Image (cartoon, rainbow, N blue to C red):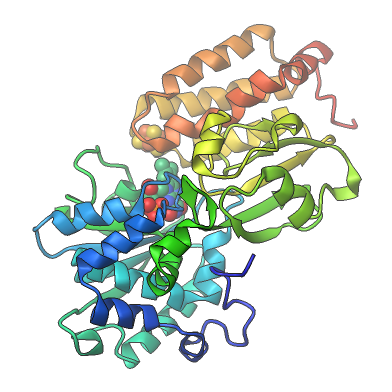
Amino acid sequence: MERLLLRNIDRENSNSIETYLSNGGYLSLRKALREMSPGDVIEEVKRSGLRGRGGAGFPTGMKWEFAAADIKEPKFFVCNADEGEPCTFKDRLIIEKDPHALIEGMLIGAYATGCRYGYIYLRGEYPVGRKILERAIGEAYDKGFLGENILGTEFSFDLYIHSGAGAYICGEETALINSLEGRRGEPRIKPPFPVNAGYLWKPTVVNNVETLANIPLIIERGGDWYASIGSPDCPGPKLYPVSGKVKRPGVYELPMGTPLSEIIYEHAGGIVGDRKLKAVFPGGASSSVLTSEEIDVPMDFPSLAKAGTMLGSGAVMVLDETDCIVRASLRLIKFFRHESCGKCTPCREGTDWLVRIVSRIEEGLGSEDDLDTILDISSVMENSFCGLGMAAHNPVVSSVRKFKDEFLKHIKLGRCPFRRS
Ligand SMILES: Cc1cc2nc3c(=O)[nH]c(=O)nc-3n(C[C@H](O)[C@H](O)[C@H](O)COP(=O)(O)O)c2cc1C
Ligand code: SF4
């Protein structure tokens, strides 16, 4: 497939404005401002079928339509560049290698929705990205793409960077907004949704980095062209970060809906040492695990939901036959326990109990009753306040369901069968 999202990354000085301009950069902004009304831009994005790449897969055009319809002012446009999910490293590539694609996408989105100010909420652990973005924003101001009366029109937009302080929950859009306001990074109740009551309780669009990098392409080549790529229900190019026991870990740009088996065996080169694949977490750390028999699934939102898991950020984590699934699920739930903000009981207590129980099983001190307790706890966690708690138990519960024998082996042997000593 032609490189679309990653079209610039191999160019010399790929993150400079000169490189971006020499490859048609900011022509989509020009087209949107000079030839299209805000409503036309929203229609084009709706026609494209673009769904958000931050995890929830919400239709981008619809989100913009809601924000555009709200008359409160000023409105804000926020780029979610928090990227805190373990094994997700796709947005970083755009931030560091092609920051102007993200800025141009934000500008077009802000024009379409009537936003006057923008923030890039950047993962605190991306200091290199921050320097690159600072330079890129300065270049965009110098060329007149940011600031007052952009390209001689009535559209004005100022853009700022805000670095997070290392909390995964601040990637959740309402916790992000709280953090941006200087409050504790905890989610807010929804509704009202940020498009109506977000930053400073004003209409606020929150979009992921990868989502925004698609926008200049859609305006340049049209929504119909975009909708013809990949899965009909969920089109476009997609960045899949692949990690774990594959020969060639990395970020792969492929049409949405590419089979998981193709991603692992053709693009990422198959399993290290040609060992057997054991399990895959197909959509980030909170996705339910798939077995080796289940990997022919198309990697898009509806297909993975049908398969009982989710696309999430699209981060593929591969385990081979030498990996212990009990230890892998323990590692993941430990992450969520650490990152739980503590606001609600099911998540705060549930993640802690899951860590305690899976730890004792992993050490060979568990009992068969523990497996039922895990399922009970997870059904309570489904009622958590936000997506973190609602999904945190998925890797553990799906591992218990699909690899029950391995959990029982730990219990019967009184030790981990994968440990040498
Ligand atoms: C716990 C949690 C963490 C999240 N982290 C991120 C993140 O790092 N980046 C992101 O874009 N979206 C993240 N999201 C999703 C956002 O809440 C939101 O749906 C997204 O930024 C909207 O942008 P999109 O429509 O372009 O996908 C997270 C959600 C949850 C529940
Ligand atoms: S689910 Fe977890 S992260 Fe979300 S509000 Fe509750 S405690 Fe906080």
**Can the viewer see residue 92?**
yes
Q: Quadrant of the C terminus?
A: top right
Q: Position of residue 130 (x, y in %)?
A: 46, 73
**Can the viewer see residue 177?**
no
> In the figure, 350 relative to 174: above or below?
above
- Picture quadrant of residue 390: top left
Q: Nearer the viewer, residue 127 or 383?
A: 383
Q: Nearer the viewer, residue 37 or 335?
A: 37
- Picture quadrant of residue 332: top right
Q: Position of residue 330 (x, y in %)?
A: 64, 31
Ligand 2 located in image quadrant: top left
Residue 321 falls left or right of residue 6: right
- Picture quadrant of residue 4: bottom right
Q: Residue at x 41, y 55 (%)?
A: 50
Q: Nearer the viewer, residue 374 or 158?
A: 158
Q: Residue at x 70, y 20 (%)?
A: 361
Q: Quadrant of the N terminus?
A: bottom right
Residue 115 falls left or right of residue 5: left
Q: Residue at x 45, y 67 (%)?
A: 213
Q: Residue at x 85, y 49 (%)?
A: 272
Q: Position of residue 317 (x, y in %)?
A: 67, 45
